[in-house]
Amino acid sequence: MSAPKDIVKKVDDLRERINYHDCRYYVLDSPEITDAEYDRLMRELEDLERRYPELVTPDSPTQRVGARPVEAFGTFRHAVPMLSIQNALNEGEVHEWIGRVHRTLGEEGVRYSLEPKLDGLAVELVYEDGLLTLGSTRGDGHTGENITENLRTVRSIPLRLMKHGAGVPSLLEARGEVVIGRADFDRLNEERRAAGEEPFANPRNAAAGSCRQLDPRITASRPLTIFIYGIGRLEGTSVGKHSELLDYLSALGLKVVDRRKVVETAEEMFDFYNELLEVREKFPYEMDGLVIKVDSFARQERLGVRSRSPRYILAYKFPAHEGTTQLNDVIWQVGRTGALTPVAALAPVGIGGVTVSRASLHNQDEIRRLDVRIGDTVVVQRAGDVIPKVTRVVASRRTGREKPPQVPKECPVCGSEVVFAEGEVVPRCQNIACPAQVKGNITHFAQRTALDIDGLGEKLVDQLVDKGMMEDPGDLYSLKREDIAALERMGEKSAENLVKAIDESRSAPFARVIYGLGIRHVGEHVAQVLAEEFSGVDELAAASVANLVEIQEIGPIVADSVCRYFRDGHNQRFLKKLRDAGVRMTAGKRPVKKNIFSGLTFVFTGGLDTMTRDEAKSLVVSMGGRASGSVSAKTDYVVGGKDAGTKLDKAKKLGVRIIDESEFRRMCDLE
């Protein structure tokens, strides 16, 4: 039985959010959510893919470690992938993991090595005959950035290993976490404030940003240190246990954590976990949990690895950071669809190294559920999205002077009427020309997944709307370079670049134009569906609700929203501006559909030269076939590319036909 449509949409949305946050965390070093919230998203996606294995795709975040590295430095491919670690959030999940270890090994009496999970930048150091020859970031787990010269400036990283009784190894790939101590972090931020620079948000960001400076002298000025926690390859000597390995690495002059332990029982694990949790805030470095590893390397090898994480390692995460403070007010923010969202204005409180003064209240239903009132003492958790969230009220501290927040009857931005649509818990401003909605629509129109207008940030949009230069995104195409250059924090070069980006956006793919229109309930996937069904905006605008609901994946709510959008006079004027500006409003010539792959299932593994795997899968589907993420006896073809994985081995065992990219292209009549 195929997965329900709402599950398919949920999986697509989760992948989109995780990919975005992967980029923010691994590529930009500017995360917007906490690790706890990221873990929740990933766990939710993993659960859905376990329940509906047909939804698993090769490009799912569950099938890889992280996002690709940036290109400011040279790249380095890890000989042994630096995989991520499976997480546990409670004792029950730790017991489940231990049970799986025992069942797989078929034996009891397994010993485990325990150590703190430090929060910094994961790196690999390559030593050849004792000499440091290369240092790189973890990157996407397979390919990292070559930051050798920066890591050479970290004093706790030896340039040459100390001699050991058994001699230094001929090859050592040491893996560790570059961190900044709490006290050093505070001093660094004080220096940055004194110099008029923006302080770092937390020690992890400071460490990552310091290691990725193009000028190694800046890295050298930062109070960085490293703790080695494992290895990739080790040649010239052998060690049988992880705990012995850490002792060996320490003897070579590499820094390892002092606070570690070897245990046999779950109770001992929980005792050590609680010891670390008790000293968490006093610990010299940020740590976010306990790492549990099967101590024996022979047993680790028997347990093996999954595509994303080893089966012999578990991270038992600490609870998300919380803080208690006073709710001073509830502010209602207006989004691009007119939705009013309540935000808690708080007495500033430090949570996990960050000062928090705003927190999400989600919607009116959440306010009622929490029974939150202005003046309440509330518990705030840094486990939300862009801003933290209020999780509960400390009702015992009420004085009787607290007041329930009221939904405004008028829009706080434009003063228009606020109404509740039937069946919704979200109040909305009815004025489509509301400056808040206009700004939101322009920002949405310009984002990377829509028209991709680089350089058009929120602050610039604020200026353009506040100065009366724009009423909707269509006005972008009539902006003059000299007018843009005259705006605050803009200049001739910035204005020239923006005008160029606006001009290039005219040829954006039709699906992205549909998404950029900002039609309510039409996300990226639905926009792609509509682009494949209609030849252009005119044909889409002429479609009735009845026409739209006949399309697979389009329901009555989406259909009604699309029809309402194109009937609106303001939107019709906006669309005319886009047509007059030469924005692409048609799908272009469509290829003739062939069903040559009808009834056939393809699996792709490894990198392709002439197309991405997503493009190859789409090609299969367009020709009547099915693209799967896993090999089974029902698979007809496995297409192997560069660095193909274990799917090829499985295909050989099952007798599935294996072809290369050239043969696949010939089957598609592309060669």
Image: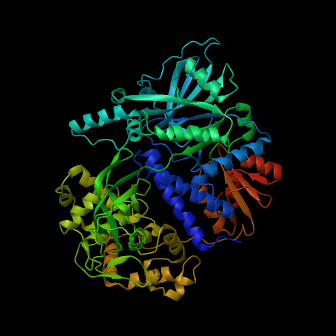
Left or right, 52 with reference to 482: right
Q: Vertical placement of 460 versus 423: above or below?
A: above
User: Measured along the vertical axis of the image, is residue 369 above or below residue 88?
Assistant: below
Direction from residue 463 to residue 93 in the image, left or right: right
User: Is residue 345 at all visible to an observer of this figure?
Assistant: yes
Q: Say which quadrant the N terminus sits in.
A: bottom right
Q: Residue at x 45, y 47 (%)?
A: 25
Front residue (pair 615, 246): 246
Q: Position of residue 209 (x, y in %)?
A: 38, 38
Nearest the eye: 71 or 504:
71
Q: Residue at x 57, y 44 (%)?
A: 316
Q: Residue at x 75, y 69 (%)?
A: 599
Q: Residue at x 32, y 61 (%)?
A: 502
Screen quadrant of the C terminus:
bottom right
Q: Please indicate whether residue 158 sits to the left or right of residue 56 in the image.
A: left
Q: Is residue 19 above or below residue 236?
A: below
Q: Position of residue 63 (x, y in %)?
A: 62, 51
- The one of 141 and 38 positioned closer to us in this rendering: 38
Residue 611 visible to an observer of this rendering = no
Quarter assignment of residue 43: bottom right
Give the x, y percent position of residue 104.
Answer: 77, 44
